[in-house]
Amino acid sequence: MLLNQIHGAVSKLYSRSSAIKNQGGSEYPPFLLFAEHERIVDLKHLYLTGAALISVCLITNISCGTVSEADTWLISIDNSTISVSEAAYAWIMLSPEQQNYFIQRGDHVNRFIVSLARKKMVIREIHRLNYLQRPDVIALGNAWIRRQASLLARETIIAAAEESITEDDINYFKDHMGTTVWYTVLPESPGEMLSGPAHLPELSRELAVHLDSMNPGDELPLSDGTLIRYDSVVVTDPVLVSETLENSERVTDFALQRLSAARGKADLERIADSILSAAEPGISDTAISDLTLYYSGLEDLIPEDSIVISRYGIMTSSDFEQEIEYQSGFMPVQPYDAVWLEWFIDITLLNDALMHYFVAVNPEQYANLSVERDAWMLSIASDKLFSDEVYSVIGITPELIRDEFDNLIEIPIIPEKRSIQCVQIQSDDVYAYETALSEANGVDSIIEGCGFWKLLSEDNPPSNITRLLLMEEIPGFRGEEVFAMLPGDTVTWSSLSSLFEDYEYMAFRLVEIYPPHTATFEELEEDLYQTVRVRLEEERTSVWLEELGEKYSLVINEDLLPSLPSDPALWITY
Amino acid sequence: MRFILILLALALVVYANSETTDVDFVRGSVGGNGSDAFLDELDYIDLEALGGSVRCVGVGFDGANFWVSDAQSGGGPLWIHVIDGVTHNLITTFDQYETEGWGLRDLCCDGTYMFGSQDNEVDYYDIGTYDYAGYYICNAVSPNRAQGWDGTHFYTGSGSANVYQVTWDGVSGSTASYTTWSTAVTNGKTYGAAWDAYNDCLWVSTNNYDYMIYQIDSNGDLIADHTYNIEIAGGCTPGIYSGSYDNQLWVLEQGSPDALHCYETAPLALEPDSWGSIKTLF
C-alpha cells in the first residue's frame, strides 16, 4: 500500500512536471522510462529518492520560471526525443548498483546515454517483432507471476493464522506444554495413518482436546466420525516445564510462533486442496514420459503434449519447458528424471492453486504484480531477441580457434603437475595406518576400501590415483607438501593430516611428475574457444546495434553531451 | 572447488587479454540437456575476509542475518558470526556458550531461536539478543550436526544416510522425540540441512568430496541428488541474496577460503560489453 502511495505521488509529480516542461514531443514520460523495473524493494527506494529529487527540481524550476538546457533533446529515435532532464530522471531512477555499473567502467555519461538510447531501440524491436506474444515469453511470465503470487499467498495465510491466535490458545498451549503424543488415524483400515511424535498443544484444538480426554490404547471417533487411536505419550519433567514457563513472555512468543506455523500450514493445505479439488487436474503419464525422454536427449519435444488438463486450462510440454527454465533460476533441476518431473508438476499445481487464492483475496496486489510481470517479460524478451540476433548468428570454427593460438604473442607456460595416490582414512583406522607405515607393503591392506577423490581420477572406474594436478588442486591442503617431495620418492606414504573435523584423515604417496612446459594447443583450446566466442559476440553485437541505429534513425546530441555535468542527476535543473 | 577456481582464473586471464573488459553474465537455457544444470552462484560471502577462521562449519538465517558457527583454533571460546543478509557486512561476533572442539555445527532458526549442536544436546540462542537461551536433548545422533526446521519439526543427521525428524516441546532441558525420516542421502555424509518452504522439500549438504547435494521431499523420499561445485560442504540454510528478497539456498563451503555460496542453476554465458550495459538498464 505504501508503495502504491509513493508510486502515485511520484506519478502526480511527474504529470505536473510534464505539463510545465514538455516541449520536445517526448515519447516517454520520464517516470515510465524505467517503469519496467522489476524489483519492488528497489522501486521503493528509488521512488522515495525520485520523489524527493523531483520535488526539489519542480520547486526550483517553478520558482525560477526559466527554460533551461534541461528541456533540450539529448536522444532522438525516429523523431521522438528524450530530453536532458528525462535522461536525468532515468539516471535517478536507477538503483545505486546500476549507477555504479556505469561509474566504475569510466566515461559513464557517454556510456549511460548510448545504452539508454540502445535500450529504447531494443524495446521498439521487441514490439515490432512481437516477442512479448511469443509462447515461451508468455509461459515464462506465467511462471514468474505464479511464483510471486504464491509466495505472497503463503505470507497472507500465515499472517491470517497468526491473527487468529487468541489468548485462550496461548493459555491452552502453556497448560499442555511438554506433552508429546503418538496416535493413529483410522486404525486398522486401508486409510490407516500413523502420526507422531507430535507436540499435543500444536495439534488442532479439537484433536488435542480429543486426545487429552483419552488414555493410551483408547479408540474414539472425532465429531466428524474419524476414528482416532491414542497410541502413546511422553510427558516432560514438570519441573523443567515450570522452569520454562517462568519466562512467560518468551513462552508466549514461542507459543505464538508455533501455533501460527501449525495453523498456517493446515490452512494452506486446506486452501490448496479445496482449489485443486475444484480444478480437477488430470495429469498425463504418457506426456510426462515424453518430456523426460526429451530432456534425456532421446526424443524431440512434443510442444502441444498436454501434461495437465484442469478447469483452469491446459499446461503443455512447451509450457513446462519454460516453467523448468524459470525454476532453474532458483534451484537445481533434473527434468530428465521422471521422479523429479512428477514432483515438479505437483509443486507447480500447488503454487498455481495458491496463485488463484491470492487473485481472489487480493486482486489489487495481484494487479500490481501483473505490471511487474510485464516489465520482467520485457527483460526476458530482450534476452531472447539478443540470443536470436547474436548468439545464433555467430559461428566458431576449429580454424578460428587454431588461428587464435597461432597468433598468440606469448604462449603460456603450464606449471608442473603431479599425480598422487591418496585416500581418506577414518579415525578408527588411524592406529592401523600408522603401524603399517613401519611395515613393508603394510599400507596397501589398510588403504584398500578407503574412500578417495573420485572426481580427481581419470580411470574408469575411478581409482585412488589422481590425474596430474597443479599444486592448488591437491586435496587436503597438502599441495606444498606434495610438491616438496623428491621426484624419485614414489614409495613413501605420507603422515596423516586431519581432513574433516577429527574423524577423517588424508594419506598419500607421489606417483608421477610432469614438469613445467609450454602449453600445447590442446591444453589451451577450451580457453581459446571462449576468447573467440566473446570477441565474435561483441563484434556481432556492435553490427546489430549499428543496424538498429540506422533503422530507427538514432541521433545523440553530441554537441550538448560534453557540456553536461558529470553527475546526470544534476541535469534536471541544468 | 579449488581446481574449478583455477580454471576460472585461467579463463579470466584469457578474457582480460581480449578487448572485452566487462564480464557480465546472463542466464542460458536448460532445454534438452541430459545432464544436471551446473549450479551457478548468485551470491558469495568470503567468511575469512570477514574475520572468520578456516574452521567455519555451519550456517543459519534468522530472517535478516546469517549466523555462522566458527570453531576458531586461536584459543578461548568458539564463535558465532552474525552477517548482514543484504550488505554482507559483519554485524557482530559473539562467543558460543560452553562449547569446545568443533563446537556448534550446522545452524537453523525457528523464527525465535537459532539452534545448533556439538553433541546430543541442541543449544539455542535468542535471535534478538544473541543470548544463550537453553537446550534440548536429542539422542538421534551425536552431534546433531545437520539442523533444519520446517515450521513444525527439526531435521538432523550426521555422517550417515539417515535424516531424523525431531519433535521438540519447547521446554528447555527436555528430551526431544524423533523418527528416522529419510535414508536418502546415499553418499552417507549428511552435514547440513535446509528446509525449502516454497518447494516443500529438504536440502541436505554433504562432505563426501563428491560434490553432491540431496533434495528430499516432505515424505522423506529422494527427489534428486544434484552435482554442484562444493567439494566439502558444511551447513546450509535458506536465506535472502543481495539481488532479491526471495529465499535461496546457501551452502557453507569448507574450502580455501571458507565461504557461503548462494546458488542458481541456469548455466551462465559471458555477455559482450555493449549488451551488458544495455541489460543493466532493464
Image: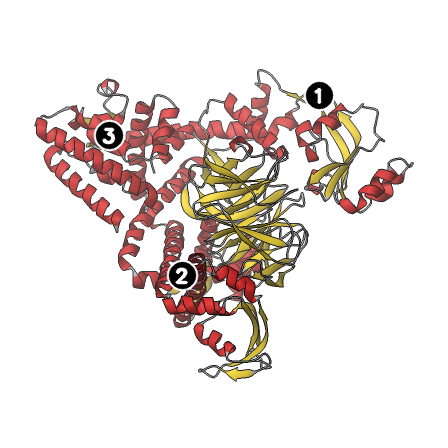
Identify the image quadrant of residue A155. bottom left
Q: Residue furthest right?
A: A440
- Name the residue nearer the viewer: A328 or A422: A422
Q: Nearer the viewer, residue A499 or B281?
A: A499
Residue B57 visible, this angle: yes
Q: Is residue A445 left or right of residue A302?
A: right
Q: Which residue is mark 2?
A: A352
| Amino acid type, callout 2 | Asp
Residues packed near mark 2 inside 10 Å, few (<14), some (14 to 19) or many (20 plus) = many
Q: Is residue B2 above or below residue A360?
A: above
Looking at the image, do the residues carrying marks 1 and 2 touch, with CB atoms under 8 Å apart? no
Mark 3: which secondary structure? Answer: helix
Residue labelled with disc 3: A88
Return the x and y of residue A107 as percentages of the image width and height.
34, 21
Residue A533 x/y as whole percent: 50, 30
Determine the secondary structure under disc 2.
helix
In the displayed image of the protein, which residue is found farthest to the top? A409
- Whether labels 3 and 1 belong to a single chain: the reply is yes
Res. A489 mark: none
Residue shown at 77% from the left, 26% from the top: A513
Q: CA distance from mark 2 to mark 3?
A: 41 Å
Q: Same subunit under labels 2 and 3?
A: yes
Residue indicated by mark 1: A516
Q: What amino acid does circle 3 point to?
A: Ala
Pointer 1 local density, CA inside 10 Å: few below 14, some 14–19, many at least 20: few
